[in-house]
Amino acid sequence: MATALKTSRRVVGMRLATYFEPGPDFNGQPTTRALTAEQGDEIELLPGEEERLDGLGALLPKGMTPKDAAERAQALLDAYRGERGDQEAMDRHVRRQVVAGPSDGGIVDVSAPVDAGAGVEKLGAWITEHKPTVDDTVALAEGDPVKAARLLEAEGVATDGSPRPGVVAGLRKIG
């Protein structure tokens, strides 16, 4: 008596993903087949395949639906087009970020004390409390080398001397 293998359903997050599943060959003999799924497809995976594709970043987090995948793809496209001058795409991107809030990669709270002349300790405390993303932290410098230097020092305070590499790289490009 054959036992059924425990499978799980997940949504593909990459444009295309190849996965393997057991199945019969042309003669009815057991074999493994390679299948391809597109972004947003919900597929059934064996435990080893789920781990492999998760490790590659090919799957959306558990619980996400195909609709979530479509919305995520549209958000990335709007951000890309908006950065290249498409005003309608930028408007959609900004509205989406305002709704998401800072904890989901949204727009940073404009009350950040960068311009207020606050000390590095206060700015570091603000970073610790509000947890801005790497991009948001770099954006706070507004291309100003003086602000970039203060933010880099504050990032060190906020992270106990272990600043995020992306913040360091981004701020060093400015100043």
Image: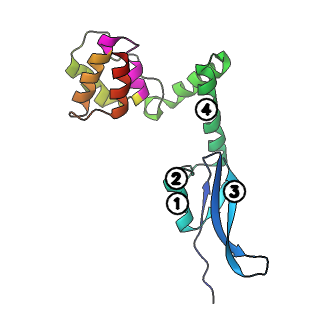
Residue 157 in the figure: left or right of residue 51: left
Q: Note whether 110 is above or below 78 in the view shown.
A: above
Q: Position of residue 115 (x, y in %)?
A: 32, 10
Residue 30 in the figure: left or right of residue 47: right
Can residue 175 be seen here? The reply is yes
Residue located beneath label 2 in the image: 56
Mark 1 or mark 4, earlier in chain: 1
Which SS type dominates the magenta stretch? helix
Q: Are marks 1 and 4 in contact (CB under 8 Å)?
A: no
Q: Amino acid at mark 1?
A: Arg
Separation (CA) of disc 3 from disc 4:
24 Å
Q: Secondary structure at mark 1?
A: helix
Separation (CA) of disc 1 from disc 4:
26 Å
Q: Are marks 2 and 1 in contact (CB under 8 Å)?
A: yes
Quadrant in which the C terminus appears: top left
Magenta stretch, residue numbers: 135-147
Residue located beneath label 3 in the image: 36
Mark 2 surroundings within 10 Å by alpha-carbon count, few (fewer than 14), some (14 through 19), many (20 or more) = few
Q: Of the numbered discs in the image, which one, if any, rests on residue 52?
A: 1
Q: Amino acid at mark 2?
A: Leu
Separation (CA) of disc 2 from disc 4:
21 Å
Q: Secondary structure at mark 3?
A: strand
Q: Secondary structure at mark 4?
A: helix
